[in-house]
Image (cartoon, grey):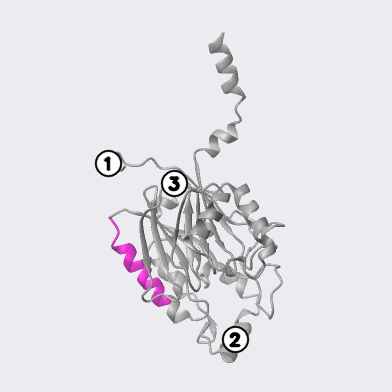
Amino acid sequence: MPKVFLLLFLALIPISSTCASNQLRVLSYNVWYGFTKVPERKKNFLNWMKAQNPDIVSLQELNGYTADKLKADAAAWRHPHTAILKESGFPTGITSRFPIEEVRRFRAGFHHGLLRARIKGAYYYVIHLHPSNWEIRGREADLILADIAKLPKDAQVALVGDFNTFSTNDERHYMKTSLEPFFAARDTKHKEKNLRDGKLDYSVIRKFTAAGLVDLEHSKRKSGYRFTGSFPTKIQKLGDHGEERRLDYVFASPSLAKRVTRAEIIADDTTWILSDHLPMIVELTHQQRPKDEK
């Protein structure tokens, strides 16, 4: 009888929960000045994050954060492992359900800095490129690719975060917008370098794709796809912030990209008004660690 009851119990376990256990969920979020602009929405953010049940989280704009504050927030979505790039300016951070290994912090040559960590055998780069200068973004991309080239052969790599630039995969959409006049006005007024010869710059993203990295959100678009930008949202901010555009990406090495089952920007009633960026979620199948790994 006990064996019969066990079989009946196993038969009642939802198939979806079994499938979910084989998925690794990676979430990226630029949280707009660390919620210092809208502190009343911080609670909703923590609740939303917990509901997503992520395994790895890449965060940008952790303004006002310390290592302890990031650790406290990560506990809300049940992550015991955290790392922060710095505790001044515009920090980035990473949190994980699994141990975070080989943490590297890069400051030289980067406007905001770069954080790299190894989790479950893969290298995660937390990205926040220069917000208003395509030339500096290009140099930052070169530094990232140079570091990737130093990793072990066949290393699995993910670049996760706010790239602040444009992809030719979205060029068809941008041709219908007024983004070039918008950035031309900004370049004149604020002495920025958003445009390259008066046009949107696609060279930075091309560097990553030319290196063989896969734009995961684009790779998972289905027939009938309608463009979803990741910035701006419906949050109230002073000034004109232009039309919707995709600034947030997850790029992966080909071997890692093969494991991806889902990659999308999440626009729902909550995320539209939490930050000025929308979050991105990627799901991939777990990979067993090699026997020689601890």
Circles 2 and 1 in contact, beta carbons < 8 Å: no
Q: Is residue 156 above or below residue 6?
A: below
Q: Mark 3 or mark 2: which is in front?
A: 3
Q: Mark 2 or mark 1: which is in front?
A: 1
Residue 39 visible in the current orientation: yes
Secondary structure beneath label 2: helix
Q: Position of residue 140 (x, y in %)?
A: 40, 74
The part of the chain drawn in magenta is 138-152
- On screen, residue 106 versus residue 127, left or right, reads left
Report the Cα–Cα distance between label 3 and label 2: 42 Å
Q: Tell me the residue that label 1 is attached to.
A: 292
Residue type (three-letter) at the residue carrying disc 1: Asp
The residue at the point 28 percent across, 55 percent down is: 153
- On screen, residue 99 versus residue 59, left or right, reads left
Q: Dot 3, crowdedness within 10 Å: few (<14), some or many (≥20)?
A: some
Q: Dot 1, crowdedness within 10 Å: few (<14), some or many (≥20)?
A: few
Residue 215 visible in the current orientation: no
The residue at the point 41 percent across, 67 percent down is: 114
- The secondary structure that most of the magenta stretch takes on is helix
Query: Mark number for residue 71?
Result: none
User: In which quadrant will I find the N terminus?
Assistant: top right
Query: Mark number for residue 186?
Result: 2
Residue 259: say if magenta. no
